[in-house]
Image: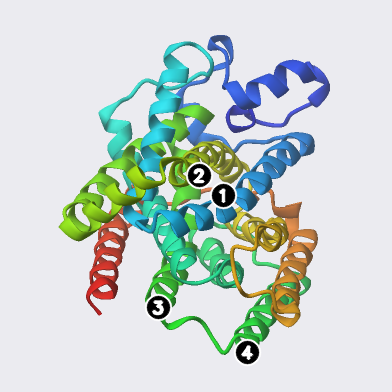
Amino acid sequence: MTASMRMGKVDVKEFELDEEAANIFTGPSAESKVSDEDVVKSSPQVSQWQVFILVAGHAMCASCLLVVNKWALKVFPFVWTLTTLQFSFAAFATYVAGKVGLVTVDDICWKKLTAFFPAAGMFFITITAGNAVVSVSNVDTFIVMRSVVPIPSAILESVMLGEPYPAPRSWLGLATVLIGAICYSMVNQGLLVGSASWVILYLILMPLDGVLIKHLVNESGLSPWGLVLYNNLCALGPGVLFSLLLELGNEKDRSEMFRVLTETPLLVGTPILLSCWTGLAISFFQLSVRKVVSSTFFMVLGVSNKILSVLLNQIAQLDSNRNVSSIGSVLVSIAGAILFQQTVKGKGISQAKGGVDAKNFTQAGRVLVVLGVFSAAAISVYNKHA
């Protein structure tokens, strides 16, 4: 029985550890599957060790992906195409793995695809915006930008999903995150102008992303690897469309892609392939984590695990920014994130009682996705011609 399909209170002693550990990664066996209706009506209750495994896996993958994406975009500076390649690889690999029996993957159902599209669409936009920020700025800028997100997310999920409001000490942690972000901005004379529009879009959509995906993941009734397939398959549609419109359809960009891929195939192909594999891993871990923790804790997790990104980025020397004050500001933000996690009710595990109007929530999600996608496309076109 997996973390994402567990119903009611759990006595860990009732289950064999090896069987549970295997099911976390492969999905439930046929005997352990439950109906979609049961999944929707019940909240997953998981043991602390299962949460730890999922959180640790997500932290490692997220930390590596940020640095790998920076590397890939340095040698292949095409944000839309790189993001689409990552979605394509994840969807194809998951589908094949399911067909050969390596993991349990839900069958593709058009009704479920359309219901899950708002979550995947929002995921697509935020990934694209994040890659764009990393491409035109530095890794530290992205980390501090990400550090601000938990503050509006905490308010939004309390209103929309019924999560408890953070305690005063938890707000102190979030305030520390913001102080670190402000200090970083002062040390570095503010955010880079080239990334400002992407930063604004990211900061608007990321809190909505957390709440929307948390809701739809819980409502979907999909297995862990089914979530990976549906998420990447849905995101692939707009990815292909905007890659063709904004990059592959442009003669100059197409010629440049062909040149870098043919002149230095190993130098360019290696980071692209690594980013695809890392993207597949983080798809699994982040969707599984989102299902069992609150959306604010997930956002805070996304900040706290970036300490490894800072270290990896300095080792790889991908940015010229190696100022001690700058790195110190990033670490202050991370410390605030950790303080929040330690003081929030449930240690971040979702405490929501439900009661959300699923139909209206999903419709609102579709509208937000459409607005977000076209905003991202407009920013991309403007920056290219500015």
Tell me: residue 85, above or below residue 223. below
Discs 2, 1 touching: Cβ within 8 Å: yes
Tell me: residue 144, above or below residue 266. below
* Position of residue 50 measured from the top left corner of the image (x, y, whole percent): 73, 34
Sequence-wise, the earlier of marks 2 and 1 is 1
Discs 3, 4 touching: Cβ within 8 Å: no
Q: CA distance from mark 2 to mark 1?
A: 6 Å
Q: CA distance from mark 4 to mark 1?
A: 27 Å
Residue matched to label 2:
275
Q: Which amino acid type is shown beneath numbered disc 3? A: Gly
Residue matched to label 4:
186
Residue matched to label 3:
194
Indicate the quadrant where residue 139 lies: bottom right
Q: Residue shown at 26%/71% (left/top)?
A: 384
Q: Which amino acid type is shown beneath numbered disc 4? A: Met
Sequence-wise, the earlier of marks 3 and 1 is 1
Discs 4, 1 touching: Cβ within 8 Å: no
Residue that lies at the very extreme toward the right in this rendered image: 13
What is the secondary structure assignment of the residue under circle 1?
helix
Disc 2 residue crowd, few under 14, some 14–19, many 20+, Cα 10 Å: many
Sequence-wise, the earlier of marks 3 and 2 is 3
Q: Nearer the viewer, mark 2 or mark 4?
A: 2
What is the secondary structure assignment of the residue under circle 3?
helix
